[in-house]
Amino acid sequence: MVKVWTFIVHFYLLAGVQGVHRISWLTCRFTDEQVAVNQEGHVETHLIPRQAMLQFGEKGDPPINPDAITFLLTASKLDLRRYVEGVEPEDLECELRRYSTEGIHVRWPVQGALGYNRWFSCTLKHSKGVFTVTGFLRHPSDQGPPGQQDYRSWPAISDRELLPTTVAMVIKTQTPVVNARLRSEQKLHCQFAVDHRGPNVTLEWHRQHRGERSRLFSHVSRSGQTHGSGVALKGLAGGDASYTLPFTKMISEGTYICSVSVVPLFASLDVNLHIEEPPRVSLNVGPTLVMEEGKEQKIMCEAESYYPLDVDITWYEQDPRASRQRVGAPLPVMLENILMSSHKHNTDSTFSVAAFFYLQASLKSSGRQFTCSVTHQSLRVPIRQSFILEVEEPSSWMLNLALVFLVFILLAILAVMLPRLNSVQKMDDCVEKEEERPESPGSICLSMKSDHSKYEPPDFSKEPGPSDTKSQYCSQRPESPGSICLSMKSDHSKYEPPGFSNEPGPSDTRGRYFRRANSAASSCRSTKSDVSKDPPENFNNEPAPMKRSSYQSASSENLGYGKRSRASFPQGETVHQSEES
């Protein structure tokens, strides 16, 4: 049982190793160089493409392709395959080139190294731009090259030559291309490794844009000198040389160069940072546009605040019901005669542009959907904005005019009737108040609320005779079974009551007070003020001419009122004055 488990463990371990190191060889393009000096003294370089193989194995392994140049990568502390784990061989691009040390000869400090080395560079790129790896291949030699060791005296390589090599240094970036938005934080990846301990490494970051090159950061491991910021020094010991941009601006765009130098090798990788700001798309109409037939309106689709400059705006027309069909749906029709505005350069270096057309409303276009499609390199899919057109038949201007005229007439009638309705309402309120007053069951009262009731009462006589009506007011009252009370609410009703006599003859009422005759019914005298205390007038049952009392004359002349008539009471009936408290 133990042997079975041991076999299973070893099987999975071997499968894992094979999974990690499943790449055994790669087809590469070897770019050879032929350098010469022309007659004018200038150096000319001719690039010669040659077929080569990158083979992973041990010393003494035969070449896989004997007809090609074979670079045999033997085991060392650095394995190039570890930097391309999980990638299929067909997704890798391999390129081999000669590397010149510019005449510098330095013994590489590794165990078993010979005095002389021939150097090559191997670059592995992912076909989709996921990463870039550059390794330096060292081919040891016990004999130095003839003459000066530089690019002008390359040793020749035959077509079937086998070159055993090892990896001396590796540099890698996982962000060869960075598309960043404005005001964002970006980390530019860069890592390196050397096949021996304690190398004197010089790390630098540069930015190059529009022909200008500026240094952002530098660090020398042996002296510890550091200039600039953006790289964590703690990570440098482990080979992490990533640079951080805390806040991207429009001027942050450019090519960032990570370079690592270990004499005599110098490696660099480019990280291209592009600022991409997606556009904001808007229409000048809502989701539904209602128009009258024959009307025209400007329809505009605007793309704002995008970067870089290139943007594509297209207008389409289609039936929204047909677009829901999965099979056999008609394609949208692209509109022609679309006009473009000039590009607007905003203050933040972004751009804006608009595409518009003039829409002529017709009934056959009612229900159609119009779509604006905007494409930009910062967008994975286009941005679309749509609206649906609804066309109505034009309304008659005569009908509109009649409606306006009718409204004016109604307003005029309402303005005239409102004051009248208010006055009628006030009169109704007064009538209701009068009707709510209580009535006396046994008396007949004359209500005189105004000052016109303040004159003295006239003489009453049962016999016919001449009377002076200039200062008297006579009226005939009907008989009543109860008492007759005269109500005088104002102060003018407070003069003394007239005197009544059963004897015939004239009577002078000036300055006299006459007592009333006893009667079966009770009599009331109103004495609300001192004015009613003047002497009453004499009343005679016999016919005789009556003199005008001085009180009546004075009252009539002072007040200036016209004639009044009072009712003469029937004979034998006692007149009562009511006291109102």
Image (spheres, rainbow, N blue to C red):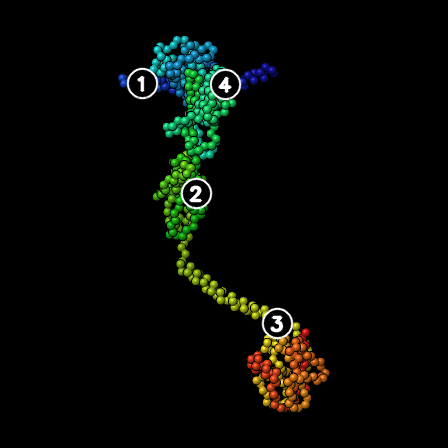
Q: Which residue is mark 3?
A: 434
What element does badge 1 sit on? strand
Identify the residue at the far top of this view: 142
Left or right relative to 153: residue 513: right
Q: Which of the two residues, 301 or 103, is positioned nearer the viewer here?
A: 103
What element does badge 3 sit on? helix
User: At 65% from the left edge and 81% from the top edge, which residue is drawn?
Assistant: 534
- Other residues around mark 1 within 10 Å, as few (<14) / some (14–19) / many (≥20): few
Q: Earlier along the polypeptide chain: callout 2 or callout 3?
A: 2
Which of the numbered marks, if any, corresponds to residue 282?
2
Instruction: Give the Cα distance between marks 1 and 4.
Output: 47 Å
Q: Earlier along the polypeptide chain: callout 2 or callout 4?
A: 4
Can see residue 64?
no
Nearer the camera: disc 4 or disc 3: 3
| Residue 69, percent from left and from top | 38, 15
Instruction: Give the Cα distance between marks 2 and 3.
Output: 73 Å
Q: Which residue is mark 4?
A: 18
Can see residue 438?
yes
